[in-house]
Amino acid sequence: QSNHMPEPASKSVKLRLHDFTLPLRIAGGELVTFEVLFKLLAGTIITPLSALMITSLIALGGNASPSNDQIASFLVSPLGLVTIVFWWVIGFSVTMAEQAGLLVIVAGTIRGEKLSVPETIRLSFTRFAEFARLSGIQFLLFTSILLPLAICAGVTYNTLLSEHDINYYLAQQPSEFITAVVIGVVLAIVGGLAVGWLHIRMMLSLPFCILNGSNASAAL
């Protein structure tokens, strides 16, 4: 009869956690170095370039030094919406490039194919155009989900809650107010589930894009 005793569950969990964190501990120095260099690069090149392009777009609206009210009016204009999309794409592309570099370092450590930090930064920005396309698709998907829900919410408000002040509805709680609340809750649940599903898809798309070489559409 074997005298081998099964390992305690706590020890097994510790061993699994050790195996999981081992690549992170081995590549810790490269991860920190990459993070510092990437943020310095983004802060000295990408951020000023983005600010310059956004300022140029605002200037195209006719105001080189706009006030706060003019900026607010600009943001709801067609050119302002272009600026918002541009900011979204650049911001998420930079974030994806940073996450891709960290992912490459960890994956290379697991595979025994470690890249130098400069090579990892170069690889991250080599795929920047793909990250921009992925960010653009992300924006379109989020917009296609949230815009119809926002329109439904606006129609509900104008149809059911536009005759009286909001304090009246809160105090009296007529049937139309209850109906509007129910519709609002349903819209919030649908929107939350859809956005959550899309967010998970986005989280999984980056590893496919950077490790498998998939394009933006295939990664999603």
Image: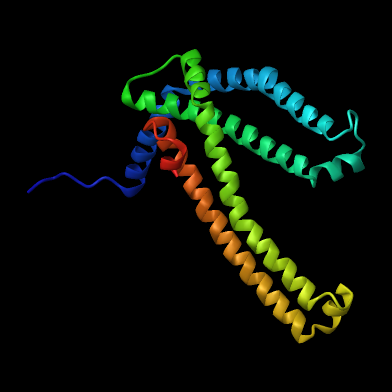
Camera-nearest residue between 139 and 31: 139
Q: Residue at x 86, y 78 (%)?
A: 163
> What residue is at 40 percent from the left and 35 percent from the top?
214
| Residue 181 in which image quadrant | bottom right
Question: Which quarter of the rendered picture does the C terminus lie within?
Answer: top left
Q: Position of residue 213 (x, y in %)?
A: 39, 31
- How are the colours assigned in the image? rainbow
- Image coordinates for residue 172, horizontal then vertical, percent: 84, 84
Left or right of 11 on screen, residue 118: right
User: In the rendered view, does 136 fall on the left or right side of 168?
Assistant: left
98 shown above or below 73: above
Q: Would residue 174 appear left or right of 207 to someone viewing this image?
A: right
Quadrant of the rendered structure where residue 189 is?
bottom right
Q: Is residue 118 above or below residue 93?
A: above
Q: Nearer the viewer, residue 19 or 54?
A: 54
Tally the numbered discs. 0
Instruction: Tell me the residue at 79%/85% (across/down).
Output: 174
Q: Residue 215: image x %, image y %?
A: 43, 35
Q: Residue furthest bottom?
A: 175
x%, y% of residue 187?
A: 63, 67
**For this view, does 218 lie left or right of residue 84?**
left
